[in-house]
């Protein structure tokens, strides 16, 4: 959560409720992390009211380690749909030969050029630009915004955030006209090189299970699955 902060967070009887103007599921979902005392159905109703008041869908981010352990079944029975199954994958950086690439630009600063390029390449809604800027600026851990240029245009980018000797890799995206040229791998290597220089010993990333190409690439690079999470969503 620290590597991808919401704009607002509320702790409710063992559940962490996150809000970020609807930008990304992770930053706008309920994380049932700790044990609870309030009846679970009452808690679900409370969350529905709170997210409805912000005109957001009610989303629960779930793993096999949630409390209560049958929460997924309870949500399904109450009309919450299954969505976005995601694999969290890790790698030991001692196994990675990530070399610094002179063509990759890295910066701690969050600037308009990186943001505009990310939204253009990812096709995310530009109305979320200020929200993403605030989220990135709220990261208190060491961060790196990487990019590759082609002439006057940015054609690949990515984000790395280090916490406790582990780097999280996010928002790795390549312009669709430049895909298949190894730029995503170069961004990945650039972020891992930066992370190793700054003391990281392992890395993790998150990939949608139905993204077969990315899934295969990360396995080829040596990433292995740590766990999966998914969402239960109700509009």
Image (spheres, rainbow, N blue to C red):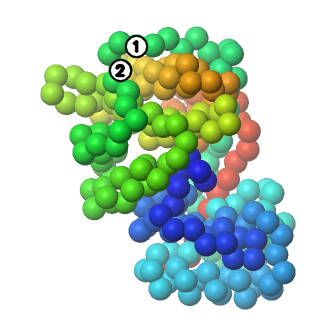
| Image spot of residue 43 (x, y percent) | 71, 83
At 50% across and 48% down in the image, what residue appears? 139
Q: Quadrant of residue 73?
A: bottom right
| Image spot of residue 109 (x, y percent) | 35, 39
101 and 180: which is toward the camera: 101
| Image spot of residue 170 (x, y percent) | 49, 40
Q: Is residue 52 left or right of residue 47?
A: left
At 34% across and 29% down in the image, what residue appears? 147
At 55% across and 42% down in the image, what residue appears? 141
Is 69 above or below relative to 163?
below
Is 66 above or below relative to 41?
above
Q: Secondary structure at mark 1?
A: loop
The residue wearing badge 2 is 104
What is the number of the mark on residue 101? Answer: 1
Q: Is residue 176 left or right of residue 137?
A: left
Res 76 visible: no
What is the number of the mark on residue 43? Answer: none
Residue at the far left: name it: 152
At 59% across and 51% down in the image, what residue appears? 2
Q: Quadrant of residue 134?
A: bottom left
| Image spot of residue 156 (x, y percent) | 33, 30
Q: Secondary structure at mark 2?
A: strand
| Label 1 environment density (alpha carbons within 10 Å; few <14, some 14–19, many ≥20) | some
């Amino acid at each position: 959560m620290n590597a991808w902060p919401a704009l607002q967070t509320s702790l409710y009887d063992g559940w962490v409720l996150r809000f970020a103007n609807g930008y990304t599921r992770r930053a706008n979902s309920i994380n049932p992390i700790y044990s609870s005392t309030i009846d679970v159905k009452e808690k679900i109703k409370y969350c529905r009211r709170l997210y409805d008041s912000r005109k957001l869908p009610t989303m629960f981010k779930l793993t096999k380690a949630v409390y209560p352990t049958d929460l997924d079944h309870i949500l399904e029975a109450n009309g919450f749909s299954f969505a976005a199954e995601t694999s969290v994958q890790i790698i030991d950086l001692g196994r990675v030969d990530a070399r610094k690439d002179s063509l990759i630009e890295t910066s701690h600063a969050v600037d308009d050029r990186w943001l505009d390029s990310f939204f253009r390449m990812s096709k995310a809604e530009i109305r979320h630009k200020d929200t993403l800027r605030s989220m990135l600026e709220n990261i208190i851990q060491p961060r790196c915004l990487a990019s590759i240029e082609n002439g006057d245009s940015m054609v690949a980018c990515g984000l790395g955030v280090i916490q406790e000797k582990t780097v999280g890799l996010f928002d790795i995206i390549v312009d669709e006209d430049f895909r298949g040229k190894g730029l995503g791998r170069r961004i990945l290597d650039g972020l891992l090189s930066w992370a190793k220089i700054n003391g990281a010993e392992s890395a993790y990333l998150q990939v949608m299970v139905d993204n077969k190409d990315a899934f295969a690439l990360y396995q080829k690079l040596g990433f292995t699955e740590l766990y999966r999470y998914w969402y239960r969503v109700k509009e």
